[in-house]
Image (tube, rainbow, N blue to C red):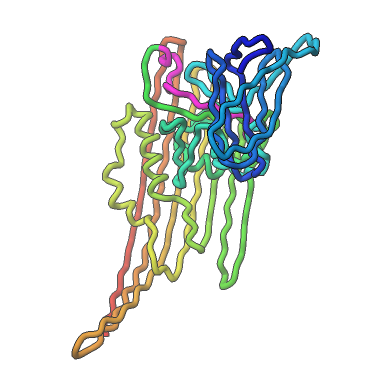
Amino acid sequence: MTDSVGNPLTSANLLAQPKDSLQNVKFAITDDKGRYRLNLQPIPYTVTVNYLGYAKKEFEINLDQDQIKSIVLQQSTEGLEEVELEMPMVVKKDTITYNVDQLTSGEERKLKDILKKLPGVEVDRNGGIKVNGKKVTHMLVESKKFFGGGTKLAVDNIPADAVKQVEVLDNYNEIAMLKDFQESEDMAVNVKLKDDRKDFVFGDIEGGLGNDEFYNAQSNLFYYSPKTTLNVIANTNNVRERVFTNDQFFSFQEGMNSIFDKGSTSFEDSYDDFSDFLEKEDVVESDRKFGAVNFTQEVNNKLSLSGYGIFSKTKESTLVESTNEYNTFTEDRSIATATDNQLAMGNLNAIFTPNIKTSGISGLSSKVQMTSTTTASTLK
């Protein structure tokens, strides 16, 4: 990419918007020689090129094979005293900032729908996030940890219409003063909310009834202000919708352990107990309830508090019937199982920063789990 006299244009932005709204937006930035690469599907795109001080250029493209396209931009002839240009994606050192409105269609419902359309970002079905192949280890909203830093509850519950920007912070360190002095393998995603969603309660509530007294109800409510945040998530249903999985449990374990130097608090012995929360087949009755609350409070400019609590209760009955035929007799086998699981876990932290050179973190965490299983077997 060059100007009208052949000089290469560095850091020009190219945005390829697919005609099919179900496809992802593609994005590229030119290097110091004006070169760029757009990896496009064989579908129609509208490509928009922006560079400060030059006229915007748009063109249509539909590739069925690799192609080299030279782009020449003309200097803008409009005389403006001040130009404000919002780039879809800005890269500065180890921070990538995505301006959501420039990269989405407005039809997205949850945060995960936005993330899937951001260049270089991947979201798996368990709520895990990767950016340029690197796993995200901390989830933040307005620079504050969201439910201990796990990504699953954030991507599934934060409404898309509340998100203004998504920041990706590589070499992330919870203690900001250490960022430039201590290398870190951690990566964080920080969600910035729209201005009209601050000092305001937002979220959604859904409910449904079906035949045979089936029901499913859930609510996601959020409040953010400069000094206070509060998030409440709840779900109750008898249609076997998964409201708290083993993947989420271990993501919380990782988030809680990171607060205590990644090791002093461990739930490694919990896997066997928690395996009862895994999905079962042949379920004849199910009743699931889940509730979670997360808060942060800035007491003053030196002390801040944060914490969360999670409660999950699952009651299920299963029935397995089988018939085995032998030479002399037939065996009819019935196995009925009733399971009642209850899990509660919580975390409370206080961060005291008396000056810019000293920071202290203290915390308290707890977990309570109760499980009872009854099995009845009948042979005929």
Q: Quadrant of the C terminus?
A: bottom left
Where residue 24 appears, as percent x and y from the top left, is 58, 39
Give the image location of residue 379, x and y in percent: 26, 82
Q: Image check: 236 left or right of 278? A: right
In the image, the segment drawn in magenta is 163-180
| In this picture, residue 157 sits left or right of residue 150 | right
Residue at 53% of width from left, 26% of height from top?
Answer: 37
Query: How many discs mark residues in the rendered view?
Result: 0
Q: Is residue 108 left or right of residue 361?
A: right
Asked if residue 231 can be seen in this view, the reply is: no
Q: Residue at x 59, y 71 (%)?
A: 211
Q: Residue 66, can we see it?
A: yes
- Say which of 43 and 359 sits in front: 43
Q: Is residue 165 magenta?
A: yes
Image-quadrant location for residue 62: top right
Task: Name the spot of residue 361 as percent of width and height, x first.
Answer: 40, 23
Q: Is residue 128 above or below residue 49?
A: below
Does the segment drawn in magenta span residue 17?
Answer: no
- Is 137 on the left or on the right of 267, as rendered? right
- Residue farthest toward the bottom in the current orientation of the protein: 328
Vertical side of 344 occupied by 340: above or below: below
Task: Residue at 22%, 89% (x, y): give it.
Answer: 329
Camera-nearest residue between 277 and 60: 60
127 or 19: which is nearer to us? 19
